[in-house]
Amino acid sequence: MSDSEAPVVLIVEDEPDVAETYRLWLEDHYDVRMAENGDEGLEKLDSSVDVVLLDRMMPGLSGDEVLEHIREGDLDCRVAMVTAVEPDFDILEMGFDAYLSKPIKSDQLEDTVVNLLERSEYDSLLQEYYSLVEKQATLEATKSRAELAESEEYDDLKAEIASLREELSETLGGIEDDEDFIATIRGLSDADEN
Amino acid sequence: MYDLSTVLDVDAVSSVEPGSSILVTGPAMTGKEELLTQILADGAAAGDGAVGVTTGGRAEDLIADIEGRVADVDSEALCAIDCRADSNRDELELDGGAYVHRVAAPSDMTGIGIAITKCFDRLHDAGLDRGRLGLTNLSTMVTYADRQTVFKFCHVLSSRLDAAAFLGVFTIDSSAHDQQTLQVIKQAFDGVIEIEERDGVREARAMGIEPDPSDWVEL
């Protein structure tokens, strides 16, 4: 998420009425941006965008193609695909983080955005946790037991790891169902390929 | 609670919290896989569902091994996921009702995740609210992916186990990695069962589940 400002949601939807409805639902809590088609969506997409609501069926550049561009680039925004039919697990591999089947209800949309932001938080906490665990292992491999016992840095590190571990388990709301679980794991493989 | 004292006779593992993930570590050929298979079999005997994930053997062999250890086994509560590098993704039900998934490679985390989800859903639909997942082994996964990805995979998986209130047991070959890698991987787990072989005798102890390590006991 970008600094203390409201999270940014980009709506890519070719039907103006539908896009407008989403905007009304979200504008109280989010900085909402709109794009009428895939090309405009890509133009308006930058590192400040946290969540993209992407209509799958659009004239011109389709939602799938926009998604491909997003995943090929180095933007780490979350993408919720808006589809006419509910996809199976396997389709989650296409690279979107959530799907919404039309017609969408207001609370459903808000829940999805909240959930995706939580998942982003989980991801960045997990990355931070991993870095600290690496650091601890490096210290343990290079310092003697006596040196570690006297090291304030090592003590602080261990305390930091313990508190992050707590924080991570509290952020698990971000992966509470099957779709979240698979999308989170898919994200790991993506990171691996980069 | 899950009772692992049937395989390791120490108090520390006699009532392991649902949702816990345990790492079994030890040098090559010290019986890690045997321990894991027995943990799954003991679970099946007690009515728990079993999900075995293997990077080295055939899923059918793992299922047969568990079936061979349990009298009157309910095979419909058994699932196995074969993620050896040479298999294509597919799924099938064996005679007797056990379920088998094949995943393209040990580095195909998404495929493994999908298969695990389907197995959990299957057990859930069968009315089972207890289950044990056993994965052997993480060393292969570290070789195919890297330790950061495997660490994160284990962490995400442990949260899924937590949500299902299942138990997770994972093996790693301690002789295949440097100390640093082992230290890192261990941090993704709630507890560790360490195996050692001294003068031809296999011993193990539990760490991290209770504040102090347990005594070494013969396996």
Image (cartoon, coloured by chain):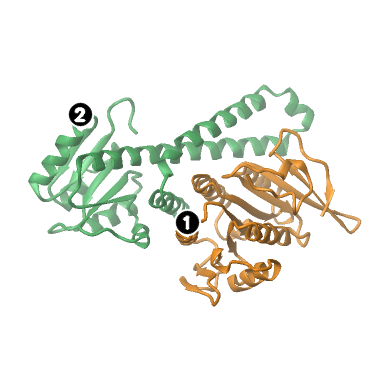
Q: Which residue bears the numbered disc 2?
A: A28
Name the residue at 81% across, 52% down: B196
Residue A6: x and y, percent?
Answer: 27, 29
Marks 1 and 2, Cα distance to the nearest angstrom? 39 Å
Q: Identify by letter the chain in green.
A: A
Task: State which chain disc 1 sits on.
Answer: B
Judge whether residue B88 can be spotted in this image.
no
Single out the residue that lies furthest toward the left: A17
Residue designated by label 1? B124
Chain letter of disc 2?
A: A
Tag on residue B47? none
When asked about the image quadrant of residue A158, the answer is top right
What amino acid type should be assigned to the residue bearing mark 2? Answer: Asp
In the rendered picture, chain B carries what hue?
orange
Picture layout, residue A97 above or below residue B47: above
> Residue A19 appears in which quarter of the rendering?
top left
Q: How crowded is mark 2: few (under 14 residues within 10 Å), some or many (20 or more)?
A: few
